[in-house]
Image (cartoon, rainbow, N blue to C red):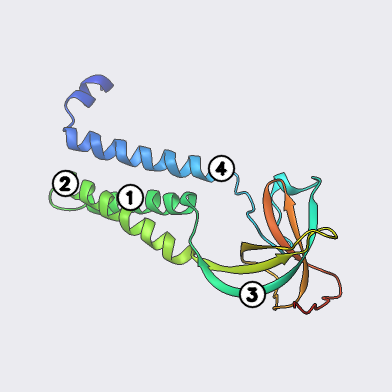
Amino acid sequence: MNFNLVSKIRNTPASTIFVAMAEILAVVVVAFVMMIPDQARAQSGNVYGNGQVQVYSQAEEAVVMQVRIKTAEPSWQTRTVGAGIGAAVGGAIGSRAKNQHVGALVGASLGGLFGERAANAVMTGDAQEIVLQVLGPSGMPARIVTIVQPAPYDHLVSGERVYLSNSAGKWRVLKQAGGNVAIIR
């Protein structure tokens, strides 16, 4: 049996080639996104990214003025993985339709859309919006800043003294040992 790859490709319908290329692209995107290191963002607790370990960080004293829980949407990497997986599954299911080429194309398109939306719904998490009064050096006025920290985060209350730390360009609010409470006047 003589197998000639070039003639096989030439005799394949364009829609089949398009679907195959879309599936290959989805697999490459998923593999690429999985290799991207997930860097910790402004977080408290025990979660630090590799770039934040063993680096010099300055900290300022601050007082918590307000804390509210917000919703944090997932990263574009997470949504892209969902779209890639959805496109591959949708394309495979659609290829079983009566017109397999059109079915695979429609299935991959709809699967990618639904996969991205599913990843967005499943991976959405909580974040803590913290308004701080940062205490300036003696004689300097205090300033008000806001930090949003995704979970896991420490439970904070208004009036609590904390540290505001910048580690490798990422801000985080750290509880002070003993949890001293200050009164803002």
Where does label 2 land, which residue? 102
Res. 2 visible in picture: no
Query: Going 45% across and 44% down the picture, which residue do you hit?
Result: 30
Q: In the rendered view, would you say 121 is above or below 95? A: below
C-alpha separation, residue under disc 4 versus residue under disc 2: 33 Å
Quarter of the image with the N terminus in it: top left
Image quadrant in which you'd find residue 43: bottom right
Q: Amino acid at mark 3?
A: Gln
Q: In the rendered view, would you say 179 is above or below 134? A: below
Nearer the observer, disc 3 or disc 2? 3
Please tell me which of labels 1 and 4 falls first in the chain.
Answer: 4
Nearer the observer, disc 1 or disc 3? 3
Q: Amino acid at mark 1?
A: Ala
Image quadrant in which you'd find residue 118: bottom left
Q: Amino acid at mark 4?
A: Ile
Label 2 sits on a secondary structure element that is helix
C-alpha separation, residue under disc 1 versus residue under disc 4: 20 Å
Label 3 sits on a secondary structure element that is strand
Query: Going 63% across and 74% down the picture, which residue do you hit?
Result: 67
Circle 1 packing at 10 Å, graded few (<14), some (14-19), many (20+), is: many
Q: In the rendered view, would you say 111 is above or below 1? A: below
Where residue 117 appears, x then y in whole percent? 37, 60
C-alpha separation, residue under disc 1 versus residue under disc 3: 43 Å
Please tell me which of labels 3 and 4 falls first in the chain.
Answer: 4
Q: Tags 3 and 2 in contact by the CB under 8 Å rule?
A: no
Res. 73 mark: none
Where does label 4 land, which residue? 36
C-alpha separation, residue under disc 3 versus residue under disc 2: 54 Å
Where does label 1 land, which residue? 87
Where residue 69 appears, x then y in whole percent? 57, 74
Please tell me which of labels 3 and 2 falls first in the chain.
Answer: 3
Where does label 3 land, which residue? 66
